[in-house]
Structure formats: structure tokens, C-alpha cells
Amino acid sequence: MNVTLYGIPNCDTVKKARVWLDAQGIGYDFHDYKKAGADAGKLAAWCDAKGWETILNRAGTTFKKLPDADKADLTQAKAIKLMLDQPSMIKRPVVEYPGGLLVGFKLPEWEAAFGK
């Protein structure tokens, strides 16, 4: 199974997800946004699949510290630009696996996706 986990290594939710994958014996590639950045094409595909409202982490401090003008009148294009400029605004983790996409770490969804 080809699984890619996208995130930031020091994020607590990413750490939980990695521990869970390891415990299940599910191998994965880790894409570190801090080192490798974010990809516009992937962000667009994720937004198309799950909605930009799901992919953009509006609860995080990075988003909250933005000027009000940057937070106003959000569209998918504007959200993608914000996430490209500051990948810490991407909800974490995002996991691509054969046949699907997971956003965030919600155990029931992960168990269903990986047949556990």
C-alpha cells in the first residue's frame, strides 16, 4: 500500500497519526512541509476532493495572526495561496492512500480507511 503522510514533525496530531500507523504496521512516506514545502497541484486536488474549508486550518495560530484583510472573502484560490505561502495553515495531517484522502486524525475514519 502506497501511503503518504503530509505534515510537520513537531505537530502533536501528526505525531499521534504516525504512532498509530506504526502500531498498525502500515508503512508510509512522510512529507515534511517545513523542509519540502507544499505543492499547488496537490493542494488544489485536496481542496477539490474535500473542500478548501476542510484543508485550510483556520483554528491555528498562523491563520489567526493574519491581517483581517487576508482572512476576509476567502475563496479556494485565496486559501491555496495562503497555504502555499505558509504551509502550517494546512490542516494536519493529510494522508493520501490508495482510493482515498484523510484530513486530520479521527480514529474511526482511519480505522475504516485502513480496514482496522
Image: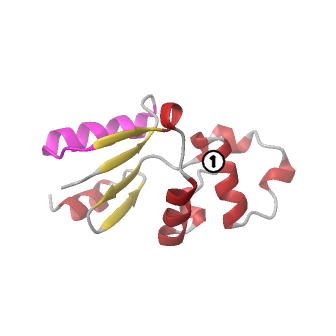
Per the image, the residue denoted by label 1 is: 84
Q: Quadrant of residue 17?
A: top left
Mark 1: which amino acid?
Answer: Leu
Packing grade of label 1 (10 A; few <14, some 14-19, many >=20) is some
- Span of residues in magenta: 11-28
Tally of numbered tags: 1
Q: Position of residue 105 (x, y in %)?
A: 37, 50
Q: Residue at point 67% right, 58% down?
A: 79
In the picture, measured across the screen, residue 57 lies left or right of residue 10, that is right
Please say if 53 is above or below 13.
Answer: below
Q: Position of residue 47 (x, y in %)?
A: 54, 65
Please say if 81 is above or below 65.
Answer: below
Seen from the viewer's position, the closer of residues 3 and 94 is 3
Q: Position of residue 38 (x, y in %)?
A: 54, 45
Residue 13 part of the magenta segment: yes
Q: Residue at point 59% right, 64% down?
A: 52
Q: Position of residue 101 (x, y in %)?
A: 37, 62
What predominant SS class does the magenta segment belong to? helix
For mark 1, give the secondary structure: helix
Q: Identify the image quadrant of the C terminus.
A: bottom left
Q: Quadrant of residue 61?
A: top right
In the picture, measured across the screen, residue 43 lies left or right of residue 73, that is left
Seen from the viewer's position, the closer of residues 89 and 97 is 97
Q: Residue at point 50% right, 38% down?
A: 33
In the picture, measured across the screen, residue 111 lies left or right of residue 39, that is left
- Considering every residue shown, the one lying at the far right of the view is 69
Please name the colour scheme applied to the rendered image: secondary structure
Residue 68 part of the magenta segment: no
